[in-house]
Structure formats: structure tokens, C-alpha cells
Amino acid sequence: MTTKSKSTGWSTKAIHAGEESLPKTGPLSPPIYQNSTFQFETAEECVAAFTDEDSGYVYTRWGNPTQSVLESKIAVLECGEAALATASGMAAVSTALLTLLAHGDHVVAMDSLYSGSYNILNDDLRRMGVETTFVDATDSGAVERAIRSNTKAIYLESPANPTLKLVDLAACAKIANAHGVTSIIDNTFATPCGQQPITFGFDIVVHSMTKYLSGNSTVVAGVIVGSKAFIDSAKKGALRNFGGVISPFNAWLTLHGVATLPLRFERHCANAGALAAFLENHSAIERVHYPGLRSHPQHALAKQQMNYFGGMIAFELKGGVEAGEKLVNRVELCALAVSLGDVRTLICHPASTTHLHVSPEARRRAGITDGLVRISVGLEEVEDIIADLDQALA
């Protein structure tokens, strides 16, 4: 759904954007349309809805009013023309890729990706005749050198999951545009509050709304943001045909999460900065990966293109896997759980959880070592988070 907003403040946008079409009298909060189909008064109205889908709703797999409000809100936050909500983050990734790609096409992708995204590129799309070249996208030159005559898309993450590597957004978007290639980026870690890749020239942004946009581990959802033409194509094609549609209830729950995103994300980032500084000076830790630290090799780039440094931290323990197991077994406040962006602090060991099904060779190339630990820093008092990790590391 396409949308515009006159407001400039992030909190104002998160609360009010996309709700302009709601009646001025009636429910203050956008209602949930928990139904599968919609009725018409006349045959002419029904035909019009099937002919011009902007004229009305037909079936929730095709669209739903609750979903439309959410899509309009996310489009405004990401500075895009339109957005399409999906059943999960991976539904957003797969729908975007399936809309763009066909047998014989080629993709250039970052070597450090969320495992689900890596697997669809490396396994599923390869079976369909789409080849992917994985590169170290921290070097934008490597991205450009990998482009072929049949390259249709560049697929990136920044910050990357779980290594916190960054890509130069402006440089990669410029490369894609120069070669006539569609640029796609997963912006889940940064959120729209942290950066807006479309303003740097990216064509398509995807999110797992399960994470920060929802914020409470109650929803599984995703979203694609891009031009109206692309979103219309994705909606009428891959999403509708493969069926990865968001439920009205999950769309409604996500709306409540998005309303508080700017406030929550500021606290996530403040806590993460303080925790990263503590971890960097701890004797049990070899290295801390956090873009907000001056020791991060891409700290200057982070300051240049990010509004906030994010709420995610990764670090290497000196004792490797054994030390990691001891750590996650000893935490008390932090929850041993995958996913991220929750109000609670979550800790996990990527090599044995989120990236278990990525080959050891691919993990090593991406910088995902056996001793890497990932923390999604929550909204608790940071002193309590630090105290918990301090006792667990002792």
C-alpha cells in the first residue's frame, strides 16, 4: 500500500503514519479485521474489486484493512513508496527474491547472512537454476567484481547477522544502479530508526518484523518495502501464489509494537553501548563486535550511515565452544533463546543454533567462529544485564 506522511519525527510517524484513512470518529486504535473474505452489495462492485484491487478488499490472502495500515506505516518509516507485510521474515525474503529471479539468473550476496537467507540462496534457488556468488561485502569492490551479465540482484545485510559486519550502503547501491541490478538489503538489525537504506539508493528493504518491529516475541511476521510497482508485482504474484500472507491478528499485534519502536530502540542501543564497553574490557573475552565501539573496524562507516549503532552485540570468548557453553548455562537474567529484538536480553551461540545448518566452511568464511556468542540487548536496567554477564563469565 502506498503512503505519504508530512511528519518528520520518528515517534510521530510510528504512532500516526498509515492511519490517515481511518475514520475520524470510532475506534482510536486501528481495529483488527479478523476475517478471511469480504462481501459486496452488487455484482458490479465485486467485478470492480477483482479488476482494480485498490477499489476494495476481496479475500485476506489478497489483502486486509489491518494489514494495509501496517504496510503504510512501515513504508513511511523506511522512506519507501509502498510495503507488503508477510507471514514471516523468510516469507519477505523469499517473496522478494522469487519476484525478481528466474531460471538462469545470478545473485551476488554477502557471505555473512542470516542462515535462512543463506540457505534459500545457496540451496533452494540453486535447485531452481539461480546461482549465487557469496562475497565479503565489506569490500564494495568485491561486490562489483562478482557481477556478471546475468546478475539480477545484490543481496546484503547491514549490520550482518551475527557478525555485525557493515556494508557501505551508498557505494553498494551505486554499484547496483550502475550495472542495472536490483539491490536488496535486510534491515532487521538496524530497524528503520537506525538507518533507511532506500535513502542511500537501495531498491528493496526486507525485515523480519518478528524482531524489533514487534518487540515482544509474540509475533512471526515480515515485510518488504520498495517501489509501488515492485510491491504490486510481489503482492499479485509470489506472495499470493505461494501463500506467505500475514494473518490479520499478527498484523494488528505488530502495529502495537511499531508504535513504541523509536522509544524502545533508543533504550536497546543505549544499553548495548554500555554493555559492549564492559565486555571489551573483560579478561575472559577475546574480541567484541559492536559498531559503536571505536575498536570496530567499520566504526567510521557506522557513524556515517547509522542513526544508532543498534542493540546487537557479538563477542569471542577466549575459551571457545566450551567457554560459550559454560556462559550460556550460567546466565540468570539473560534468556538462552534465539531470535532478537525482544524487551528481554537474549543470548545464543550461533554455531550451534541459528547457523547450525550452515556448513562449517561457510561459517568460517563468514567469520562465524565456534566461540562466537550473540546477545540481543534488552530493556532491563543495564547494570542488571552487566551484573548477570559478569557473574556468568567469572
Image (cartoon, rainbow, N blue to C red):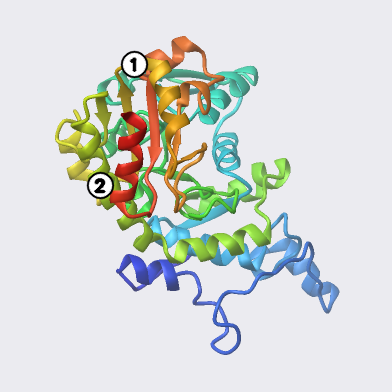
User: Between 100 and 318, which is closer to the camera in this rendering?
Assistant: 318
Q: Is residue 109 visible?
A: no
Q: Which residue is mark 2?
A: 306
* Mark 2 crowd level (few <14, some 14–19, many ≥20, 10 Å Cα): many
Residue 136 is situated, as x and y percent measured from the top left of the image, at: 33, 20
Placement of 147 over or under 47, stated as above or below: above
**Please, what secondary structure does the residue beneath circle 1 have?**
loop
Coordinates of residue 394 in the picture (x, y in percent):
31, 29
Q: CA distance from mark 2 to mark 1?
A: 33 Å
Residue beneath the point at 31% across and 56% down: 267
Kindly identify the amino acid type of the residue bearing the numbered disc 1: Gly
List x then y, in percent, for residue 195: 31, 49
> Who is closer to the viewer here, 70 or 115?
115
Q: Residue at x 28, y 50 (%)?
A: 383
Residue shown at the point (33%, 65%) measured from the top left: 10
Q: Farthest residue toward the top?
A: 361
Q: Quadrant of the N terminus?
A: bottom right
Considering only vertical position in the picture, is 173 above or below 226?
A: above
Q: Earlier in the sequence, mark 2 or mark 1?
A: 2
**Mark 1, residue position:** 319
Q: Is residue 178 above or below residue 266?
A: above
Return the residue nearer the eye: 229 or 351.
Answer: 351
* 27 or 128, nearer to the observer: 27
Q: Position of residue 11 (x, y in %)?
A: 35, 68
Residue 174 seen from this side: yes
Quarter holding residue 381? bottom left
Q: Amino acid at mark 2?
A: Met
Q: Residue furthest right?
A: 43
Q: Is residue 160 left or right of residue 86?
A: left
Question: Tags 2 and 1 in contact by the CB under 8 Å rule?
Answer: no
Residue lying at the far bottom of the rendered structure: 25
Crowding near the residue tagged with mark 1, few <14, some 14–19, many ≥20 C-alpha atoms within 10 Å? some
